[in-house]
Image (tube, rainbow, N blue to C red):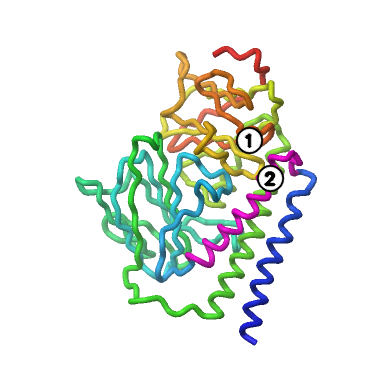
Amino acid sequence: MAEDDIALKWGEFCDTLKAAGQELTKGHVPQDEQSQAEGLRYLSRIARAALEWYVEFNDSAFPVLYKPAHETIKLGADNPDNIYEKAVIDGRFDYLLTGNRGTVDYISMATSKGSYAENFKQIETGFLDSNKLKTDSDGNFEVLLSAHEQPGNWLPMDKDSESLLIRQTFLDRQVEVPAEIHIKRVDQSVVPEPLSREKIKANFDKAIAFYQNTIGLFSQWSKDIRETPNSLPLADQAFCHAVGGDPNIIYYHGHFRLSSDEVMVITLPSIPECQTWNLQVDNYWMESLDYRYHKIAINRHTATVNADGSVDIHIAVKDTGHENWLSTGGHVEGTLCFRWVGCKDPVNPTARVINHSDVST
């Protein structure tokens, strides 16, 4: 019967969550209490993300801009300097974004096809950033999303586009005003159709696939990163962009493993011309640490620069007294993410480990 059919789909979703618990005991996963506790929480957070992305906000005819990652849902080295907003779209329709630019340092808007629920990829189909966004004298703007070229602010799609992602990147959240943005389908109907059995089952199929694929993707990524401890190498940019990275960003992904008396020193030999840069401390699960209560990220605006133009950043369990100290939030092991944003000539950061007693502030 139809009711049983839907009940079975719920059971399949619950079985998926149960099976994911095995991730916590894999040999490459840290077994310390904090990493395990946060791992369990992470599994619950991705479950919430799956339901929000593919059940709650999955109507391309009536899209809603929602926050796919924030203070309590984190994935894939989410940027503490960002507000993320996402909407499901369909390349067969046209959409209108309306809003006010605010004063946030950088905004990027990207349409894409593919998803973690399908093929692990989000292939860009259109891109527009705040350096090219036209506004009126009060900062108001309109952007048309369409598979066909439009006058003014145009964010391209193609017929297979299915996602819009907006990043607002701050230098200083305390003083900058975020943009306010809304979306609607240009030719939308009056009200959505009633939810059908076929639609909700299809949505749960996507939620299940997203959950399995996301947990698996970032688990493997963390495993790979962990193989070169206390380093911050240049990441595979093609891979980063294929899974949804901003094309204006150059990404580095690294790892730290420190005793309570050790300090990882990240040095930027110089700061090339760029929109901004930032470094963040993440846990093993590639979640940014809780930036509401800990200093775990630094950027072009907040960093203290040496007289020679270089920047030294300290990552340590204990405060080193250095102006550019970042906390590990109690972790002795975790991952790192560094970004050059809008940089044509990137400089690779270097990493070394010193003893806490050897720190000069």
The residue that appears at 68% across and 45% down in the rendered structure is: 37
Query: Horizontal and vertical percent for residue 107?
Result: 38, 45
Above or below residue 177? Residue 51 is: below
Earlier-in-chain disc, 2 versus 1: 2
348 relative position to 106: left or right: right
Q: Residue at x 70, y 48 (%)?
A: 220
- Disc number lying in front (2 or 1): 2
Q: Could you tell me which residue is drawn at 63 percent across and 50 percent down?
A: 42
**Image-quadrant location for residue 321:** top right
Label 2, label 1: how many angstroms apart (C-alpha)?
Answer: 22 Å
User: Residue 335 bears which disc, if any?
Assistant: none
The residue most toward the bottom is 1
Q: Which secondary structure is most common in the magenta stretch?
A: helix
Judging by the rendered image, the residue that carries numbered circle 2 is: 37
Q: Which residues are magenta?
A: 29-57
Location of mark 1 (residue)? 254
Q: Nearer the viewer, residue 289 or 157?
A: 289
Residue extending farthest right:
27
Q: Quadrant of the N terminus?
A: bottom right
Quarter where residue 130 is shown = top left
Helix or strand or loop: what does disc 2 sit on? helix
x and y percent of residue 308 in the render? Answer: 47, 14
The amino acid type of the residue labelled 2 equals Ala
Q: Secondary structure at mark 1?
A: strand
